[in-house]
Image: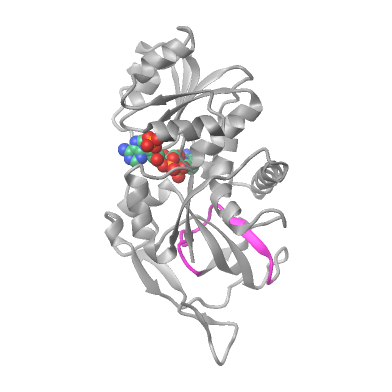
Amino acid sequence: MAFECAHNPEIRVMPLRIQFARHGGPEVLEAVDVAVSAPGPGELRIRHRAIGINFVDTYLREGLYPVAALPSGLGSEAAGVVEAVGADVGDFAPGDRIAYADGPLGAYAEVRLLPAQHAVKLPPAVDFETAAALLLKGLTVQFLLERTCRPQPDESILWWAAAGGVGLLACQWARAAGIRLIGVVGSDAKATQARAAGAFATIVWPREDVVERVRELTAGAMLRVVYDSVGRDSFTTSLDCLAPFGLLVSFGNASGPVTGVDLGILARKGSLYLTRPTLATHLASRERLDAGAAALFQRVREGALQVHIGQRWPLREAAAAHRALAARQTVGASLLLP
Ligand SMILES: NC(=O)c1ccc[n+]([C@@H]2O[C@H](COP(=O)([O-])OP(=O)(O)OC[C@H]3O[C@@H](n4cnc5c(N)ncnc54)[C@H](OP(=O)(O)O)[C@@H]3O)[C@@H](O)[C@H]2O)c1
């Protein structure tokens, strides 16, 4: 619990943060009290109201993706209130409601410093929980369906983990665009959720044969594009769902990374294309972030995109949240609440 420094209200001491000093399972996450100083030049000090959990947080914890140094904070996405601004910050003021989806790790915290370039202001109609569950995942769906490849109305695509945080947004986005999203999910309950969100059809995996079901659903034509975030366990199956010259968009590693690929497999399976895109590249400019966030918030305001928050944990219980995510027990977005 944070408290105000008696002598200098500019310094709030000892808010809670989750960090890890070594890589490993959820047990390496520890809750510590850390001093948060006044913001430096170009920085904001933010009091979080809701923190987005993303699967990438588990890759960083495990060491699959590198961190700058240990001990390290965790989390890339949150929403909250600006408490103080540093020198050279023109666009934000104390009291502003903001959210962010990239930048230095450290969202798993009650209070943090953040370079202002990563923050976007929240419109009044978007609450903190919605923003923290939406921004990173929604911007991901946006770049995947609008920039990596642009599926056409009535086109069928395959989307793995269709009932997850990213997945339920993708189902809605696809339905709004007239795209027939075939969602792969881990249970009948998740299939129901994905179809309710807009999936055209679902495949419960591994109980059903994904390639055969895609063959049936496309009357043998197979697909021009597959969106695969499961990685190691689904890679070959995804390639087998593509028509000649098709594109595999591999954008995650929930089952582990795809490594050691013999590129000849792309030739043998029909002159296929393969890309491994990341949101970080797509958010590299401030203009992209502003335009992307504005478009997302507009969709939410219009009711065209609804954020499904399936789980909430107190910030202190981040390890429990990671266990649930890894065990495929979550549906939609997951939040930590400070
Ligand atoms: N490239 C990028 O910039 C980018 C940005 C954001 C997210 N992503 C990726 O998008 C994916 C979805 O992210 P998210 O945060 O929304 O997570 P999520 O979809 O809510 O959770 C991951 C889901 O993956 C499925 N899964 C399949 N095999 C799994 C396994 N062995 N272990 C754990 N889960 C498995 C599970 O769904 P079922 O039980 O239904 O199979 C699970 O619920 C992740 O792979 C993430 O890394 C990539």
* Residue 218, horizontal then vertical, whole percent: 49, 11
* Residue 76, horizontal then vertical, whole percent: 49, 55
Image colouring: one colour
Quadrant in the rendering for residue 147: top right
Q: Residue at x 49, y 36 (%)?
A: 167
Q: State whether residue 85 is above or below residue 67.
A: below
Q: Magenta region: which residues?
A: 94-110
Q: Residue at x 49, y 59 (%)?
A: 104
Q: Main secondary structure of the magenta part?
A: loop
Q: State whether residue 133 is above or below residue 35.
A: above
* Residue 259, horizontal then vertical, whole percent: 30, 33
Residue lying farthest bottom? 7
Foreground residue, 336 or 253? 336
Number of numbered labels in the structure image? 0
Q: Is residue 151 magenta?
A: no
Q: State whether residue 1 is above or below residue 264.
A: below
Q: State whether residue 215 is above or below residue 2.
A: above
Quadrant of ligand 1: it is: top left
Q: Is residue 96 magenta?
A: yes
Residue 256, can we see it? no
Is residue 61 shown left or right of residue 302?
left
* Residue 75, horizontal then vertical, whole percent: 45, 57
Q: Residue at x 69, y 66 (%)?
A: 96
